[in-house]
Amino acid sequence: MSDDARDPSVSSARRESARGAARAKELAARGIPPEGPAFMVANDPPERGRRLFASECAGCHTIGGGREYKAPDLAGLFSLEWVKEQIRDPDQPQRFGATKLRGKMDTFGKRLAPERIDALARFVHARRDPARAEADPSLEEGRRTFARVGCAECHGLGAGEAKDGPNLHDYGSDRYLRALLEDPGAPLYFGKHSGMPAMRTRLTPDEIAAVMAYLRTLEPLPVHRQQQARR
Ligand code: HEC
Ligand code: HEC
């Protein structure tokens, strides 16, 4: 990792362009098509997704920090660190603090020990493969804690079970991300307090797939990794 990537003060724009250049190099290593390198980069899904993000999403979302937040910062989306931060403090500014969902989920960092938050986060993070999350014995503590501390009151784990918070049946899977982007205000996701436009009326399925490919390339915020290491 470069020093820049570790320095939270480096502008996200600069890190973004470095990411674009690195991606071009990665693609070139696989062989350049007859249309040339510019064509190849422009049609690569993550690169196409990056450009769509700039026009359709960056008005509200930052990646890796900003001066002010209007919506969650999407660095490290759905990573284990992401889930821990959500449980610890959902109302931090780079999460839901600046949205109409502020205050709708408890701040569990105030009442749960870090080990319990870790266990919960591992269970929720594993939900992208729901059968595994239900069966894996190493996730048992998180599974039990989820029911015991009240997560289940606001979050359904069964497919299609709508409660006040997002349904976490297959949280973090491609299916979950696609459905959330298509209609974030659906009862299964952020519901009536959602402040995000439904992308199914703005983007084609192909474009949504490209944005998803781009989102999957984003790493956790360096500042969160540091907090995590200290905790
Ligand atoms: C009082 C209702 C409530 C409780 C209790 C609650 N949540 Fe939430 N949760 C929400 C709401 C509402 C959201 C939407 C975002 C927000 O408000 O922070 C959310 C969002 C989430 C998300 C999704 C964040 C994302 O990436 O989209 C996860 C994961 C989550 N909660 C996990 C948990 C866990 C684990 C617990 C128990 C420790 C818990 N929640 C307890 C209401 C709740
Ligand atoms: C008008 C502002 C706005 C625009 C434009 C917007 N979003 Fe959002 N987005 C939000 C808000 C606010 C939330 C918090 C949840 C909610 O209110 O629905 C959110 C939530 C999300 C989440 C869920 C984060 C989590 O914690 O689970 C993802 C992923 C996301 N947006 C991606 C995108 C992408 C990709 C685009 C562009 C294609 C986009 N958003 C465009 C405002 C916006």
Image: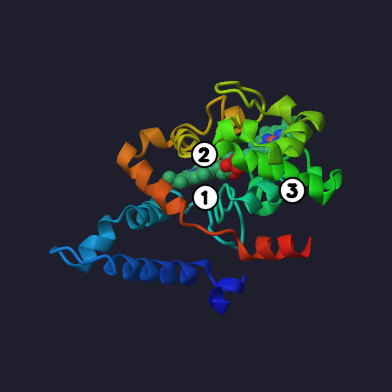
Spatial CA distance of label 2 from label 3 is: 29 Å
Reading the image, the residue beneath label 3 is 118
| Residue 204 visible in the shown view | no
Q: Earlier in the sequence, mark 1 or mark 3?
A: 1
Spatial CA distance of label 1 from label 3 is: 29 Å
Q: Give x and y (percent) for residue 135.
A: 63, 32
Mark 2 or 3: the one toward you:
3
Q: Give x and y (percent) for residue 172.
A: 54, 41
Q: Give x and y (percent) for residue 92.
A: 71, 51
Give the quadrant of residue 194. Answer: top right
- Asked if marks 2 and 1 touch (Cβ < 8 Å), the reply is yes
Reading the image, the residue beneath label 2 is 196
**Point 59% across, 27% down: residue:** 192
Residue flagged by tag 2: what amino acid is it? Met
| Quarter, ligand 1 | top right
Horizontally, is 126 left or right of 111 in the view?
left
For residue 160, above or below residue 208: above
Give the quadrant of residue 145. Answer: top right
**Point 78% across, 43% down: residue:** 107
Q: Identify which residue, 210 or 195, lies in the foreground.
A: 210
Q: Secondary structure at mark 3?
A: helix
Reading the image, the residue beneath label 1 is 60
Q: Which mark is residue 185?
A: none
Spatial CA distance of label 2 from label 1 is: 9 Å
Residue flagged by tag 1: what amino acid is it? Cys
Q: Is the CB–ligand 1 distance for label 3 below 8 Å?
A: no
Binning the other alpha carbons within 10 Å of mark 2 as few (below 14), some (14 to 19) or many (20 upward) gives: some
Q: Give x and y (percent) for residue 211.
A: 40, 48
Mark 1 or 3: the one toward you:
3
Looking at the image, how many numbered discs can be counted on the residues? Answer: 3
Horizontally, is 155 left or right of 198 in the view?
right
